[in-house]
Image (cartoon, rainbow, N blue to C red):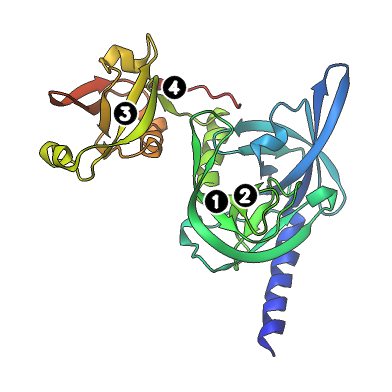
Amino acid sequence: MSILRALSNELAAIADAVAPAVLHVGTLRSRGARGEMSGGSGVVISGDGLALTNSHVVHGAVGVETTLADGRTLLADVVGDDPATDLALLRLAGRDLAHAELGDSNALRVGEFVTAVGSPFGLARTVTCGIVSALGRTLASRVAGRAIEGVIQTDAPLNPGNSGGPLLSAEGRVVGINTAIVQFAQGLCFAVPSNTAAFVVGELASHGRVRRAWLGIGAEEVLLPRSRATELGLAEPRGVAVRSVQPGSPAAKAGVAVGDILVELDGAGLRTVADLHRALGANALGRELRLVVVRRAGSVALSIAPDELRLEPR
């Protein structure tokens, strides 16, 4: 058997196995006296009807209807959506549904074949193929000041309507949820990694939201003089500078001041704003954390108790 035939057979087998779990997601949004219909894609991840899609597909919808591969139409409830990762969890009104398995996105390598399935322009269960072009990309999220980390870049062709559909590994497991394309660019398509999706699913299923901690500061990344960083014992001459402090916030209560440079939180080094976001997960809630800041006189350790952040999309 030729290499091309073997590859064709493998891709066809993936499509046959996973396509029954891929959904067309239709939404109704209220626009004054009239409703507005829009759509995207999704993938069922459990037999009892849990499905993943994008937050931007369902956020603000007054009704969600899904169409299965066998033509059945099922209403869906939005269990929760997370604009910060552009993910949403649905619960379909059905049982014993065909479903796909979430894989380990950390195991992906650049150059691996991946397959995307979705409903571009309403053409349900369209299959495209490409490779992993890059890993660890960062995309701006729909929440001001936050970014989606660890994004998968692929050249598997995506179009409007693919949003929320699965990106599949060579083993047929879901390694990403397709989220974005760069308009007027060829081969620049992005997916939220499945490991991020697994975390979000757990939070949404348990709490209806993704819990994150909040300090109440405006910040930006800065470089420190290397001599100063060495003097302070920092591994790298970088930190997060405080540009504003919200009155009454956890930062204000802890004594954080404009001009401080944050370099450590709860034992984790802070080199970038992304580092700060990662340190402010749900495990930071309900605790007093040690925050190390650099001031003119040297480094100062403060005790800070983050509040829960409530996100609203832009």
Tell me which numbered mark, 2 or 1, is placed earlier along the sequence: 2
- Amino acid at pointer 2: Ile
Give the residue pinned by disc 2. 177
x%, y% of residue 250? 34, 16
Residue under numbered circle 3: 241
- Tags 2 and 4 touching, CB below 8 Å: no
Please rate how many residues cluster around mark 3, counting C-alpha atoms within 10 Å: few if below 14, some from 14 to 19, many from 20.
Answer: many
Q: Does 36 sit above or below residue 162?
A: above
Q: Kindly tell me whether residue 94 is visible in this rendering.
A: no
In the rendered image, which residue does mark 1 sit on?
194
Which quarter of the figure has residue 262? top left
Q: CA distance from mark 2 to mark 1?
A: 7 Å
With respect to residue 146, does 242 lie above or below?
Answer: above
Q: Is residue 27 above or below residue 132?
A: above
The label shown at residue 216 is none
As drawn, the label of residue 308 is: 4
- Whole-angstrom CA distance, mark 2 to mark 4, is 26 Å
The residue nearer to you, when weighing 135 against 236, is 236
Image quadrant where residue 100 sits: bottom right
Instruction: Please state which amino acid type lies under the numbered disc 3.
Output: Ala
Give how far apart the Cα atoms at labels 4 and 1 are.
25 Å
Question: Where is residue 158, by image quadrant?
Answer: bottom right
Disc 3 is placed on an element classified as: strand
Q: CA distance from mark 3 to mark 4?
A: 22 Å
Residue at image location 21% in from the left, 22% down from the top: 302
Residue at the spot 31% in from the left edge and 24% down from the top edge? 287
Q: Secondary structure at mark 1?
A: helix
Q: Is residue 103 left or right of residue 34?
A: left
Distance between the alpha carbons at the discs numbered 3 and 2: 33 Å
